[in-house]
Image (cartoon, rainbow, N blue to C red):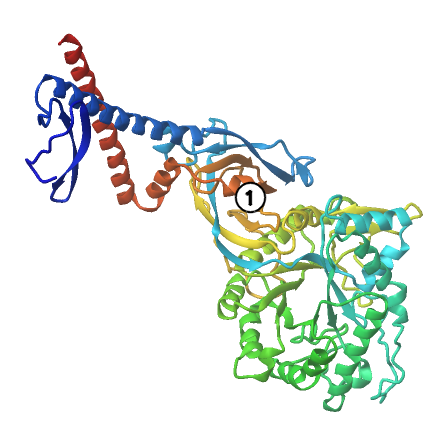
Amino acid sequence: LKQDRAVAFPTGTALWAARGRPGGTQLHLYAAENSGRWPWRGTDEGRVAHDVTATYFQMATLFWFVLVTACVATSPDRLDSSVRWWQTRRDSDDRLKEMAPLTLRAQSSYSNFFRPRPSEVPADTPSAALRIRLDCGQRYQELLGFGGAFTQAAASVWKSLPLDLQDTVMRSYFDPLRGIGYTLGRVPINSCDFSPETYSFDDTAGDYSLHYFDDEVKIDAMRTIPMIEAAQKYCNVSLKLLASPWSPPAWMKTNNNMLNGGKVNDTCKDVWAKYIVRWLDAYSDYGVDVWGLTVQNEPESSQVWESCEYKVQEEVAFVTNNLGPLLRERYPHIKILGFDHNKDHLYEWARGLFDNASASSSFFDGIAFHWYAGNCFSQMQRVASAFPNKILLPTEACYELTQVRGNEVEYDSFLANGSWDRGEGYAHDVLLDLEAGSAGWIDWNLLLDETGGPNHVSNFCDAPILADISTQQKSIHFHPQYYYLGHFSKFIRPGSIRIHVDVESASMTGPSYSSGTEDDDCRGWPVYGMCPPNHLKGTAFLRPDGNVALVTINCGNEDFWLHVEMRGDLFVENTIPAHTIQTYVIDHDILIARPSVFAALREARRTSPFLHKRMVLLVLVAAATSSFFLGLLTFNSSSESRR
C-alpha cells in the first residue's frame, strides 16, 4: 500500500500493512470498523495500535534479556569440566605423578572480562606469570613417537638381569599404561662403541658374493633381538625400528679397519649395499621388521670406535647408485634418512640431500641428526621451512660421563638418583626440537650398567635407567631423564599433530620471561644438553583421540604462575614450581564446544582494540535503547490504565 492510501475492510477486522519507505519497510496497524478507515487514530483504534506497539517493545526487550541471559548461562565462571595433569618436581617425591584435577573456568564474567589476564591471581602465587594460548586451528607436523636405542651394550646388561627386572625395564619403557609408552627404537648394524666387542657378520675378505654372511646374525640373536621381541610384547602399536650402520666390515674400507674412520672402497659400494639388505632379511626372518634406515652414523667424524666417513655428495652418490635402488626393490616401505650427525651442519646437508635437481631427492625420505653440537634449533626451523615434506628426526642424545657436573662427584649418589639437570636438558631439547619441526625423538642407550657401559673404547655414558650388576643382588635405578621423557612419550602418542602454542609473558612484580628458541650454544661438542634457567616453555599436540596434550617445563629457580587458555574462552591456572615439568591433558569435549558471545568479545579485545571498542559500544547502545523503550512502555501502560 502506498503512503496515505487506505482500503476498507469488513467490520471488526485488523491487519498489518507494509508502507514503503526509502531504505526499508515500516509496519503499521490499520483497524477497520463499520466499513470505515482509520489508520491509527481515534479511541478504539488507538487502543489497538497501542496494544501492538506495546507487544513490539516487549518482544524487543525480551530478546535482549534472553540474549544476555543465554550468554552468561552458557559461559559460567566455573564449569563442571576439569583438566587432568601430571607432574615431576625436583624438591618432592613427584615422579610422573597425577595430581588433583584443575577446575576449568570460563572468561565470561564481567570481573574477568574487563581485566588483563591472568585473572584472579591469589595473593600467595608466584610473582612471575606466564600465559599459554592453545590454537587447534594452526597445525604442523605429525608425530612418529619417542624411543631409545637397542644397543648391544643395553641388550647385554638386560640379559644379565633377573627375569623380573628384565620385565620391569621393558614394561617401564614400552607399556603405555604402566610405563612411558615408547614406540620407536634404534638398532646398530654391526657393532658400535656400545658393544662388548667389535664384530660384523662377514669378516671374510673379498667375499663380494657374501657367501659367508651370517644369515642367522648369531651375535644379535643372542642379545639384541630378544630385547626387541620383549619390547614388542608391551607396545600397543607397531614398534618402529630405525637401523643405522657404524661401519662396514674392515675389508670393505680404505683403512682396512672398522675403527678410526676411513671410507668405503669404490669397489665395495655395491657389496656394502647388498650387505645391508641381507642384514634386513636376517632380522625379518626373526619377525623383526625395520621401519627406517640411516645411511651412516655420524658420517663427518673419524672416531676411535666404529666409524666411516662420507661427504654429503658421497652419501648422495651411494644412495642414488647403490643402496637406494636395492631398497626400493626389496623393501620399498623402508624410509631412508640421510646425515645422522650433529645439528650444526643440518641445513647444509639437507640442501645436498634434498636438492630437487638431484636424482637422490626421491630416495631420501628425511634427515636424522644428533644433539652433540648444542641447541641449533634455527637449523631445524630452516630445514622444516625449506623441505616441509621431509621427516626431521633426532636419533641420538646422551650425557658422556667424562663431562662431570654437580652432584655427580658423589658417584654412589649419582648411580641411585642421577643428575636432575640432565632430565631438564633432555626435556629442553625434546620440546624445542618438536617446536622446530621434529617428528619424534630417539634417546641413545635404553640401559647401561653401573659404569655407564659396557663400551669397548671406554666411552662411558649416562642413561635413563642404569643397572647395578656388580653385586649378587642386582638392581636398577631410574634417572631423571626417564621421568622427563615420559612426560612426552606417555601422553603425546603416534599420529598426534602439533598445534600452535602462543607463550606470552605476563610478569606481575618479577622479571620478564619468554619462550624463545635460543641458539646461543650452537658451538659444537661438548656444549650440549643444557636447559637455560630463565625460560618457561611449552608444546602441545592434538592426539588421535581428540584430546590435547600440553607439556611445560620450568628449569629455573623461581616458581611461575601459569595461565593456559584454550578455545578462546576457557582457561585453567596453576603454579609450575622451580625445576618442574608438567603435562596437561585437555578433553576433546571441552575443545569442540562452541564459545560464547563474551568469548568473541574477549578475543576481539585481544586481537583488535578498535573492533573491541566498537563491539562494546554496540552492546551499551543496545542496552540503553532497550532500557529506554522499557521505560516508555511502562509510562504508556500507566497512562492507559489511568484513562
Judged from this view, the residue extending furthest toward the right is: 472
Q: Quadrant of residue 296?
A: bottom right
Q: Is residue 67 above or below residue 361?
A: above
Image quarter (top left, top right, bottom left or bottom right) of the C terminus: top left
Q: Is residue 335 visible?
A: yes
Kind of residue at badge 1: Gly
**Picture coordinates of residue 545, whole percent (x, y):** 62, 48
Q: Is residue 257 above or below residue 640?
A: below
**Picture coordinates of residue 496, whole percent (x, y):** 60, 54
Q: Is residue 342 above or below residue 183?
A: below
**Picture coordinates of residue 176, whole percent (x, y):** 72, 48
Check disc 1 and report its element: helix, strand or loop: loop
Disc 1: which residue: 556
Question: Left or right: 633 with respect to 39?
Answer: right
**Picture coordinates of residue 564, whole percent (x, y):** 49, 40
Question: Left or right: 193 with respect to 129?
Answer: right
